[in-house]
Image (cartoon, coloured by chain):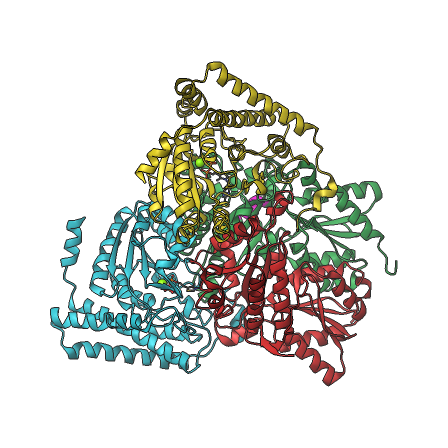
Chain colours: A red, B yellow, C green, D cyan
């Protein structure tokens, strides 16, 4: 299969949907000739014109809010927020308006809005440009929350998000933008709410998403090659809705669960996953505690070495796997 | 523009339209009195924000719209709803949290909406509806629908960041939105003079190169003509800013001891009640008799009683419905 | 001991601190003559004047942001947000500025800010005035997050919050404002980060906070009276920092944990607590799954009956306790 | 006011002060050139926003402050820092993420701050510093400190809600804040004419009853005098709004292909470089020789090289420090 980057996959998804449906359009800061802060929409304005690829003033509340209003009245806006950290400015519009409109109005509104927001550290941009706040949105009924980890998923899930009649927050992974992967040439979508098992295994379930997936896959391969340990790597892909069944049945099989995400561990979405498992059919099958490896409990620091250590590393994830495998009752 | 304005001013409104405007003002008044009555008897839970005394603004403004135009409204939204022509039965049912309400009982007083008829909803967040109005205006423009959005908000809301961002965006994109600031003198307890660092509120529009007009918000004809003008301008050329000067007669919400204002001030504004004023105008200028206008009031009160009867017989939503309608 | 309401306790805390320290002041919408949306600061402007009890325009971002700026330059502002739902408007100032300033500046700033925000449903105010979003803030390093459940705690914790050199989000419980409870007359504080065991018991740990505490205490008493079941009721009081030790040792003792909060279960703070327990010393002692009872996965509806059922009820909590007590491996 | 202005205009700045201003402009230029050099060689990670071409604004404005006055700054903050009198060694160390940096390496280019000396920090969020400036002004007022806050922000930031809320609040409370909009023509790729619905940016101030002035942001003397005036007015009577017209010569950040503007436009502004212009002025009007001004440039470049040497020998923060300084 041809390989394209994660950013290209996202651009393809938007362009294909815009070609098929005049109601779909893209707006945000510098999405036009600049191509967005990360070049994701580069060139789109040439094809679709500045009416459908709209540059906006720096007004995140109005960016999201006008997306909500346009969505409620018949358009299917894709809104780009340059860094997910700036969702903080538009939270009322997203959480109090967009997410709740349908329910508050007794079903008499639909809000087919996609909010694209790149997240994560690793770019040397420090505390205000590097957060992973996806857990916040997973807490909000009315939203869907996608965190794609491969180009293929990014494209297929974004197409589903654009066709979805609900507001979807689509967390793109900055550090994956330039990573290539196989992406089918012909039309496809990937449903929101279906996990993907990237690697089968019977020894431990490694549940992860976003930019931690490649790291976890490396470790799983390494442990298999070196020690014959078979780690099952499961990516929920969307954290709301969450494909509880797939996670639970994996852990029921392996008896051990490690959850890895870049976001700060405390209050992060790993807690939700752990809680789901700890109150599931898998509980009696647990052979070890449910462990999380997430970001340290600090803002993202600037200095490159610190920035690397603040999130899960090869070492910290690998050690956690081995510790859980060694864990015994009564030890 | 001056000419056009004059033309609208002189435009004769037919008797039917005038009567409809009075009817709507009376409906709002009666609706609100009923709401107050329900609260005073503890028959309804939650809180509500009464529009009594401000009826001329909602009615004059919405009377200037085409049926397919949009409105966005506020926490003090009953008047806007009725102006826009909502069904009273289903509105009252929503107020009482019943399953036949516009929102199936899930929205209540602060969230009555009817998106299909262009009412994009009351809003519990001060300033929350303004960006939504801009988005609706964007739809209208992109789909070449020629629909205008009338965006209501208060003097308190005009200090929210969302106000600024929205007016700027609407102006940059020349969207068909009329921003209507209802200056009822207070935001809860705060006098507009203490919340807003400019005395002439129309000055705010200059920051967005937007035309602005003010109007006596207790004079329904003045509101009608001013908004009419603005709506047509917005339809053709982009956003307009309006300030309607009026007054909130009742407390801010059900729990307001009125510690921040004087009884005299309230009384002075009561004397400017827009309903008798409009009645007087109809009698003096339009061949209405006292009986005619009284009948309108009477009919309105009856309509509200009917709405109450309808709403009271409507069942509460079932517990099963609690998880419905979160997602499409 | 004398009894005063939760609201009075908060007022006393503010007034006492303002008498002792000129740097402490209160600002927010209608906090002056109106006394705040819930009358909490009623009368304070008479004692302290309108310079120290400052009414503000409706500008939540600037309310919080000017609090951050004043705090960073030597004042100790208490900021009131009328409903915690409106924190959404000031999230950038709270999360990106206030919470991170100290770390970003390498320790060269302190931000002694208290943000008071009433939360919870039950007042008939529907979806935009009734949320419980405390989990969001627990996810943010740099913040402290308090959720007091009694008048005594409210007063003692607020005094600690005001004296704390870090930004504290103080979630007041609307439905508790008018509830009375014993409050010492003489000066005291309650440290942030210490859980409180409200009732000892060996059969199950019921972990709860905020307005769910009274409900849980009722159920615990009832089960003791009726069935001799002894439920240990533990209130973490602050969710960041979280007193993990007290929670863990309770569950180690009882072997069973039920977590109850009003917030939506999905993505709520209960997930964090469950995850902490599932990866703790208590894990091998677990005799049953770790269960959560939280809000249903919907916005808060208006209709009173629905509003009651959307959050944990006497029935739902009681049944959960009994189910966990009945739970057996292999059953 | 006109008189007072004139008085300032005619006020003679001593040779020392003038030289210091030139020195700071040269320091900024050299600092930025060094930063660009580091990036071009891939020797530093992250991104940065260069202030080249805008030096007259930061230097003229901060020269008008008292030492104990505050500033709040932006993502493009190196110039403001140097103007406010930061230690270059520690600033360069911070830029390189070293432990002797102002933020111990945790802040980097976008978060350099020195609260003790009144520099409340650069800010990664566009518009994020504006409410903080208002808060600092509030402290000054409540503590009767008589300190002014100079709040820098860009033409892009002037469309954020935080701008509106902050200006309104500062005006309502008459706080000693000078809001200085640096109009460098672009916010990333967006021309101010397309982002901002008013052509004369000083119009925005009228919405807050605030005095406003504009200035040639590439003329350091004009900036100095205008800001000086504004600062004294703010100290006595409350906020003032200033617009400084200048231009961003370099790309927005390290990854900018300049697709949104022409080479001619950039060249035209390069011809208005504020540094040679100020040098010329000093030579023509203040008895400086060409050698004098060249020496200032030379010294600045040396100071920057020294700062680099200092910063390079400073160790990276230890991994142990990663969890320090989250809480006080
Ligand atoms: C964002 C937000 N802040 C505060 C409130 C609480 N609140 C409800 S109405 C109101 C006053 C609004 O004043 P104004 O905009 O003038 O409208 P009015 O009530 O006068 O109609 C306030 C502060 C709210 N609902 N939303
Ligand atoms: C809230 C927010 N939105 C977007 C960005 C990304 N961004 C950084 S600088 C910038 C342009 C800012 O323009 P302006 O305020 O004019 O300052 P300038 O860069 O021209 O100095 C943008 C969009 C940001 N940092 N913060
Ligand atoms: Mg008002
Ligand atoms: Mg700019």
Q: Is residue D4 left or right of residue D262?
A: left
Q: Is residue C245 above or below residue C184?
A: below
Q: Residue furthest bottom?
A: A226
Splitting the image into 4 quarters, where does residue A196 fall? Answer: bottom right
Q: Count every numbered label the image shows and give the total.
A: 0
Residue B18: image x %, image y %? 46, 26
Nearest to the observer: residue D214 or residue D1: D214
Q: Is residue B308 above or below residue C2?
A: above
User: Is any part of residue B271 visible from this angle?
Assistant: yes
- Identify the image quadrant of the N terminus of chain B: top left
Splitting the image into 4 quarters, where does residue A204 fall? Answer: bottom right
Q: Is residue B95 magenta?
A: no
Nearest to the observer: residue A67 or residue D286: A67
Q: What secondary structure is the stretch in magenta mostly built from? A: helix
Q: Residue furthest right?
A: C331
Q: Is residue D186 left or right of residue A310?
A: left
Nearest to the observer: residue C194 or residue B158: B158
Residue C299: image x %, image y %? 64, 47
Nearest to the observer: residue A199 or residue A67: A67
Residue B37: image x %, image y %? 58, 24
User: Is any part of residue C54 visible from this angle?
Assistant: no
Q: Is residue C158 magenta?
A: yes
Q: Which residues are magenta?
A: C154-159
Residue A220: image x %, image y %? 70, 78
């Amino acid at each position: 299969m041809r390989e394209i980057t994660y950013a290209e996959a996202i651009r393809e998804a938007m362009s294909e949907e815009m070609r098929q449906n005049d109601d779909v359009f893209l707006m945000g800061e510098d999405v036009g000739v600049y191509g967005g802060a990360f070049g994701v929409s580069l060139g789109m304005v040439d094809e679709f014109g500045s009416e459908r690829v709209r540059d906006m003033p720096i007004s995140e509340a109005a960016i999201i809010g006008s997306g909500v209003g346009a969505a409620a009245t018949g358009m299917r806006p894709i809104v780009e927020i340059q860094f997910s950290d700036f969702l903080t400015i538009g939270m009322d519009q997203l959480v109090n308006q967009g997410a709740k409109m349908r329910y508050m109005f007794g079903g008499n509104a639909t809000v087919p809005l996609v909010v694209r927001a790149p997240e994560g550290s690793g770019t040397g941009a420090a505390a205000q440009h590097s957060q992973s706040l996806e857990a916040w949105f997973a807490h909000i009924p009315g939203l869907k929350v996608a965190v794609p980890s491969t180009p293929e998923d990014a494209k297929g899930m974004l197409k589903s998000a654009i066709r979805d009649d609900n507001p979807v927050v689509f967390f793109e992974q900055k550090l994956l933008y330039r990573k290539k992967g196989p992406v089918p040439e012909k039309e496809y979508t990937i449903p929101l709410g279906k996990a993907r098992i990237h690697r089968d295994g019977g020894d431990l379930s490694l549940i992860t998403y976003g930019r931690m997936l490649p790291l976890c896959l490396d470790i799983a391969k390494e442990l298999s090659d070196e020690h014959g340990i078979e780690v099952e790597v499961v990516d929920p892909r969307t954290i709301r809705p969450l494909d509880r069944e797939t996670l639970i049945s994996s852990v029921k099989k392996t008896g051990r669960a490690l959850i890895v995400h870049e976001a700060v561990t405390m209050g992060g979405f790993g807690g939700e996953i752990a809680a789901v498992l700890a109150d599931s059919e898998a509980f009696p099958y647990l052979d070890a505690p449910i462990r999380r490896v997430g970001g340290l409990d600090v803002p993202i620091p600037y200095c490159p070495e610190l920035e690397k250590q603040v999130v899960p590393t090869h070492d910290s994830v690998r050690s956690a796997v081995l510790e859980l495998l060694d864990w015994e009752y009564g030890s | 523009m001056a000419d056009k304005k004059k033309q609208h001013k002189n435009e004769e409104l037919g008797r039917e339209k005038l009567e409809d405007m009075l009817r709507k003002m009376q409906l709002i008044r009666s609706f609100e009195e009923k709401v107050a009555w329900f609260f005073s008897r503890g028959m309804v839970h939650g809180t509500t924000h009464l529009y009594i005394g401000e009826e001329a603004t909602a009615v004059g403004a919405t009377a200037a719209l085409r049926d397919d135009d949009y409105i966005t409204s506020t926490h003090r939204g009953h008047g806007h709803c009725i102006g826009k022509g909502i069904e009273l039965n289903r509105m009252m049912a929503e107020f009482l949290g019943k399953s036949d309400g516009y929102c199936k009982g899930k929205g209540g007083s602060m969230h009555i909406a009817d998106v299909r008829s262009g009412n994009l909803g009351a809003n519990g967040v001060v300033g929350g509806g303004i960006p939504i109005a801009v988005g609706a205006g964007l739809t209208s423009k992109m789909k070449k629908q020629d629909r205008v959005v009338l965006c209501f908000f208060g003097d308190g809301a005009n200090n929210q960041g969302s106000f600024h961002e929205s007016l700027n965006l609407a102006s940059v994109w020349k969207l068909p939105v009329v921003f209507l600031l209802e200056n009822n003198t207070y935001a809860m307890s705060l006098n507009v003079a203490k919340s807003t660092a400019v005395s002439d509120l129309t000055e705010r529009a200059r920051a967005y190169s937007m035309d602005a007009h003010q109007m006596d918000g207790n004079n329904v004809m003045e509101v009608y003509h001013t908004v009419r003008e603005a709506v047509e301008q917005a339809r053709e050329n982009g956003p307009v800013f309006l300030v309607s000067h009026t007054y909130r007669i009742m407390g801010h919400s059900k729990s307001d001891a009125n510690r921040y204002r004087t009884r005299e001030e309230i009384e002075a504004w009561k004397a400017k009640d827009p309903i008798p004023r409009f009645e007087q105008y109809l009698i003096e200028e339009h061949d209405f008799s006292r009986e005619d206008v009284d009948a309108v009031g009477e009919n309105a009160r009856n309509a509200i009683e009917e709405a109450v009867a309808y709403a009271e017989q409507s069942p509460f939503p079932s517990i099963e419905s609690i998880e419905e309608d979160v997602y499409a």
